[in-house]
Structure formats: structure tokens, C-alpha cells
Amino acid sequence: MNKIEQSVTSILLLCADVKLRSFIGRVFTSFETKAEMCLNVSDALNALKQRQFDVLVLDFDVSQAPEVFKERARVPWRYPGVVLALVRTEQIAQTAGHRIHLVLQKPFAEGCLKRTLKIAHSFVVKDKRAAFRHPVQIPASASMFEQGKYLKLQDAVIQDISYTGLCLNSDPIPPRNSMVSVAFNLPDTREHVDISGKIMWTDPNGRSGVRFEQVTAVQFQKLRNWLETKCPWDIELPLAAASLNDQLRSPVSSIQ
């Protein structure tokens, strides 16, 4: 378990084949994660309406499997961020025109499915990490570059921070597209960070969104080291040791 409660990638599997479900379920178990399994399109659509999933694994042998993609048009903000299609050679053409991130062609070996799931997880982590905002109240020294000189921003406080930017409260509010410099000490570690960024948005409450533009590798590493203890999506997909040992003892299995 990570320093914080580990966030498990949520997976929806649409598959009617008993043997294939068992095969995939074993691989999911090796990653210490579970999937909600549906046997038909109707059940999958109901599941998508009830909760949000990170990954959709879609077996194109299921009758009318592409119908699931209609749910994307209805609620795009809740649709799984990563879609993995399981197809036979003659079904590859059916994937055209749909937003499918990964295609795994049957038959495939267990090791191939594991590698594909790790890729899918990395896509999810990238999106989640980019969207992660950690709320803080950090006093800062800030200034904006205007007309060839820096103007100090009064009462600057960072209200949230991420891998790509921060929310700054200050007086005055820097105009959109202006460049600002922000210096602050990270809580707990007291590491000093000095960054420059571009104002992407502002609001009437004195807040502005800063997108990092100039951050040295050393400064970013300080921020990364601190954020990784706060962000539940700065983790690798864990492979259970027992599963790895079994893999070393057993021949490679595959599914048709």
C-alpha cells in the first residue's frame, strides 16, 4: 500500500465467454484489482449509467458490442477514459470510427494482456494526475511581468497546486496571458520552489490560474517529490508477488 490509500483503477468488462472472463479475471487478480463483469450490452449500458469507470474492456464477440459507444454521446463526461477492444482479425474493421485506445487481437497470451492493462492504467494515471489539484494555503512571493518590468503582487497565497500549475490569490489580479513569477516554501519539507507561469484564467474573487511555463528540473523534482505523497494517482499498477511467482513456474497461457 502506498503512503496514502491506493486508488484502484475501476474497470468494466463486457464479455459473454465464460472461459475468456475467467482468463481475464485471473489477470485482473494478479494486479490486485477487480472488474465489474457484464454478459450483454444492456447490462453494460446500465452499469455505465450507474457509476463511472476508468477503463472499458469490450469483447467484440458480444452481440451488438459497438452499441456501448452510444453511451459516450449521451454522457461523455462520465464515459471511461480508456477503451480496450478484444477483437478477432475479421472484427478489426468494426473498431473504425470509435474512440478506441487499445486493440488486443485474439488469440492473445496472458503476458500480452498484462502489458496492455499496464498501458491502459498508465493512460488513466496520466489523465488523473494532470487533473489532480491539491488544496493548500501557502503564502508566496509573486510578481507579474508587465511593460518590461516586474510588478509585485500583494497578499499572494497559493490555494491549490498540481503537477502543471497552481491557483494564486493576489492583489492585483494579473491579466490573462500575462507572465508571473511565484516563489514559495512547500509545507512540511520547507523546500523552496521558484517557478514562472502564464495566467490562463481569472475570477472576481482575486484568483488566477497559473500554468507552469518555466520550471527547472531541480524545482520540478522538489514539487514532484512533495506531490507524490498527496496524489493518489502517482502510483504504478501493482503486480501481486504470488502471481509473478506463478508466472515464473508456469508455461505461458493464451486464450482463443
Image (cartoon, rainbow, N blue to C red):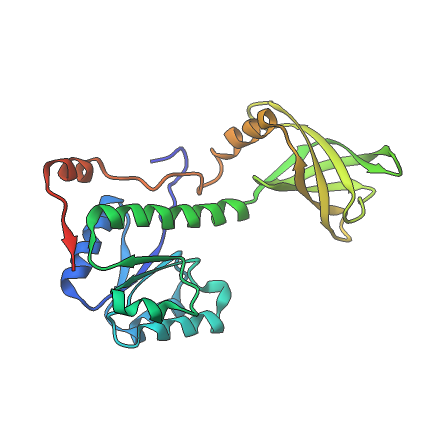
Q: Quadrant of the C terminus?
A: bottom left
> In screen coordinates, is 50 left or right of 214?
left
Q: Nearer the viewer, residue 198 or 1?
A: 198
Q: Is residue 134 above or below residue 9?
A: above
* Horizontal side of residue 67 vs 128, given as left or right: left
Residue 46 visible to the viewer? no
Query: Where 221 sits versus 251, above or below?
Result: above
- Quarter-of-image position of residue 54: bottom left
Residue ID at (75%, 53%)? 203
Q: Quadrant of residue 250?
A: top left
Q: Position of residue 225 (x, y in %)?
A: 51, 29
Q: Between residues 35 and 256, which one lies in front from this camera angle?
A: 256
Left or right: 2 with respect to 178? left
Q: Residue at x 27, y 47 (%)?
A: 114
| Frontmost residue, 183 versus 96 | 96
Residue 216 horizontal/vertical position (percent): 62, 28
Judge by depth and name the residue closer to the eye, 131 or 123: 123
Q: Position of residue 153 (x, y in %)?
A: 81, 36
